[in-house]
Image (cartoon, rainbow, N blue to C red):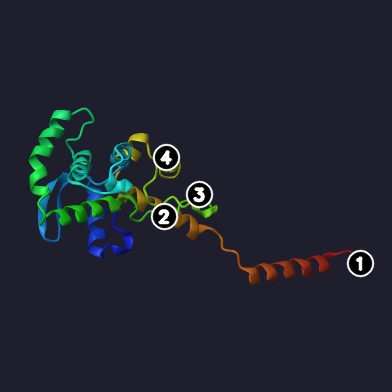
């Protein structure tokens, strides 16, 4: 997956805009369009890619078969049991995407697409308690996806369907805004103000004490 620090401002904006629309867009880069339409990455896709141990999310050597599997799972036509459609999809895209001149662009575009998983993801409460950060890569396992769903249901009012089908880049922005608000609104401890208040109360107690 492309390191978040390597994303340009334009790439970040593209990921955010595509997550808002929730519409499929052709695989593309700065040089133009060159691939099939893909939806913004959502937990629904993530779970299927984890189940397939797809190297584009889980790490390891990446071949054209893995790219086609990733593109199919994120395709608007994806269905888990549509084997014939998947074969036709592979027949249509295997040769053009595996050309040596194009293959590096394919991998870069898929890395960019997968970056939506962590784009704008805040440090979640578990990490604040000194536990393992929720933003670690390789990507979250199924139990961590369940924990993220619970968090979104509690703090964002998501239904189950909204969590699984809302793109990560959109959900992450909502979580970032929510936790930023909590931090901004929380009273901040000021040692000097605390000492002054304590001294004021002590003096008041001395003045009102019976003589």
Please name the residue that numbered disc 3 is placed on. 126
Q: Residue at x 64, y 69 (%)?
A: 191
88 on left or right of 73? left
Identify the mark nearer the N-term, 1 or 2: 2
Disc 3 crowd rating (10 Å Cα; few below 14, some 14-19, many 20+) is few
Cα distance in 3D space between marks 4 and 2? 16 Å
Cα distance in 3D space between marks 3 and 1? 54 Å
In the rendered image, is residue 24 in sight? no
Q: Secondary structure at mark 3?
A: helix
Cα distance in 3D space between marks 4 and 3? 16 Å
Instruction: Judge depth for marks 1 and 4 and give the one in front.
Output: 4
Q: Residue at x 52, y 54 (%)?
A: 128
Q: Secondary structure at mark 2?
A: loop
Cα distance in 3D space between marks 1 and 2? 57 Å
Identify the mark nearer the N-term, 4 or 2: 2
Cα distance in 3D space between marks 1 and 4? 59 Å
Please name the residue that numbered disc 2 is placed on. 122
Q: For residue 211, which numbered disc appears in the image?
A: 1
Instruction: Judge depth for marks 1 and 2 and give the one in front.
Output: 2
Identify the mark nearer the N-term, 4 or 3: 3
Please name the residue that numbered disc 4 is placed on. 153
Q: Secondary structure at mark 4?
A: helix
Q: Residue at x 61, y 68 (%)?
A: 190
In the image, farthest residue toward the right: 211
Quadrant of the image occupied by residue 192: bottom right
Could you tell me residue 167's position as x and y percent? 29, 45
194 on left or right of 17? right
């Amino acid at each position: 997956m492309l390191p978040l620090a390597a994303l340009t401002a334009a790439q970040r904006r593209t990921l955010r805009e595509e997550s808002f629309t929730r519409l499929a867009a052709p695989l593309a880069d700065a040089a133009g369009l060159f691939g099939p339409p893909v939806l913004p990455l959502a937990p629904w896709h993530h779970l299927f890619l984890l189940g397939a141990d797809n190297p584009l999310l889980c790490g390891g050597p990446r071949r054209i078969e893995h790219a086609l599997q990733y593109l199919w799972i994120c395709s608007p036509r994806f269905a888990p049991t549509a084997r014939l459609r998947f074969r036709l999809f592979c027949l249509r895209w295997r040769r053009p995407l595996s050309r040596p001149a194009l293959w590096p662009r394919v991998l870069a575009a898929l890395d960019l697409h997968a970056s939506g998983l962590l784009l704008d993801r805040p440090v979640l409460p578990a990490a604040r308690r000194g536990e393992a950060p929720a933003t670690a890569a390789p990507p979250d396992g199924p139990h961590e996806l369940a924990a993220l769903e619970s968090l979104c249901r509690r703090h964002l009012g998501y239904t189950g369907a909204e969590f699984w089908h809302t793109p990560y880049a959109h959900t992450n922005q909502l979580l970032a805004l929510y936790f930023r608000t909590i931090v901004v609104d929380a009273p901040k401890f000021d040692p000097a103000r605390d000492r002054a208040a304590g001294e004021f109360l002590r003096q008041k107690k001395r003045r009102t004490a019976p003589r």
